[in-house]
Amino acid sequence: MSKFISGESRDQSTLFPESLEDYVSEDNTVRVIDVFIEELNLAELGFKGLILKSTGRPKYHPATLLKLYLYGYLNRIQSSRRLETECQRNIELMWLLGKLAPDFKTIADFRKDNGGGIKNVCKTFVEVCRRLNMFEKPVVAIDGSKFKASNNKGNNFTPSKVKFHIDRVEKNIERYLELLDEADKEQANVTKIKATKERLADFRSQLKKLYEIKEQIEAHPDKQISTTDPDSRLMKTQGFTRVVSYNVQSAVDTKHHLIVAHDVTNVPDRGQLASMTKLAQEALRKKNIRVLADKGYFSQPDIKDTIDLGAEPIMPKTDTSSSEKKGIF
């Protein structure tokens, strides 16, 4: 065993106990998180929970939970339960939070209740980067990411889908009415007739709900509704599959790979170029920026609006011709 690298004995005691400071290097990212958040005015940024009540149990300071949230963001730890676990075993988090370990419910509630404040922190960070002259000749890349909504695909309705369900239910109603007629002729047992009538009533109830949904769709500007998550929409993803989701737009600085602007939408990429360019310009406080995007953003009116904003859009043109498929070049 002498030829292998040996660790210290678990039973070894020391005269001067080691501190958490010894385990966190000077250039560790958690030190940046700590300094950045300590300098923020959380009240001005819109965070809740800063005013304590005279009674009740003490709560965690929003700065503590914000540090935990940012640490999770930077290390791709999104789950509140995983963050709770990391607080109990991660030395970096022990140093950052002073060995505090909030439970997952506290972490989840903080994110839910302080969405606006967290968004303002992102804006403040971009402003700090701007003051450090990190965006002297800004070039931003814009793209969208589909995030699956909590709305199940079965609870999303379009005109064609609701028509399909209405036709299906109406056929079932006709079939059960025929079964009742046959049961009357054959003098079937009471139990069978009762079950058929109950099933028929169930289908009629479904049909009523479907017609109500149809009216809602016709009145909706998008001609589409989601019953569980009303703001979500059915969108195409990679591979042309359709998923009920949100389209999160991001504008990223190409030099430092920092997200300078973002927005949550429920529409496709096409038509988002000018609006995202404007958000990036506001964040960078510069008009003459270069904007990169893929062909999914190609829209002549949108490109014109982007140029009118003072930006320079660059993207490939969408291939809308069917000549190649036909063998015509």
Image (cartoon, helix red, strand yellow):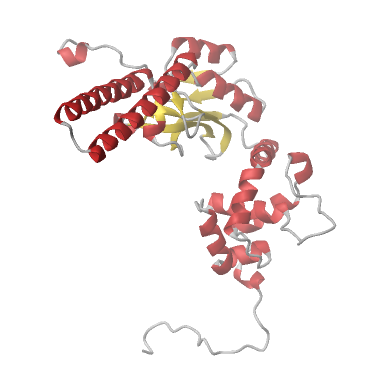
- Front one among 1 and 73: 73
Q: What residue lies at 55% left-to-right and 69% top-to-bottom? A: 89
Is residue 212 in view? yes
Residue 178 is situated, as x and y percent measured from the top left of the image, at 20, 24
Answer left or right for 161 relative to 171. Answer: right
Answer left or right for 60 relative to 309. Answer: right
- Front one among 20 and 157: 157
Q: Is residue 78 above or below residue 87?
A: above
Answer left or right for 308 relative to 2. Answer: right
- Front one among 94 and 152: 152
Residue most toward the front? 187
Q: What residue lies at 20% left-to-right and 27% top-to-bottom? A: 184
Is residue 41 in view? no
Residue 329 is situated, as x and y percent measured from the top left of the image, at 19, 11
- Quadrant of the image occupied by residue 161: top left
Residue 32 is situated, as x and y percent measured from the top left of the image, at 65, 54
- Quadrant of the image occupied by residue 165: top left
- Which of the image's four quarters has the N terminus? bottom left
Q: Is residue 250 above or below residue 304?
A: below
Q: What residue lies at 63% left-to-right and 20% top-to-bottom? A: 287
Residue 269 is situated, as x and y percent measured from the top left of the image, at 45, 24
Q: What residue lies at 56% left-to-right and 21% top-to-bottom? A: 275
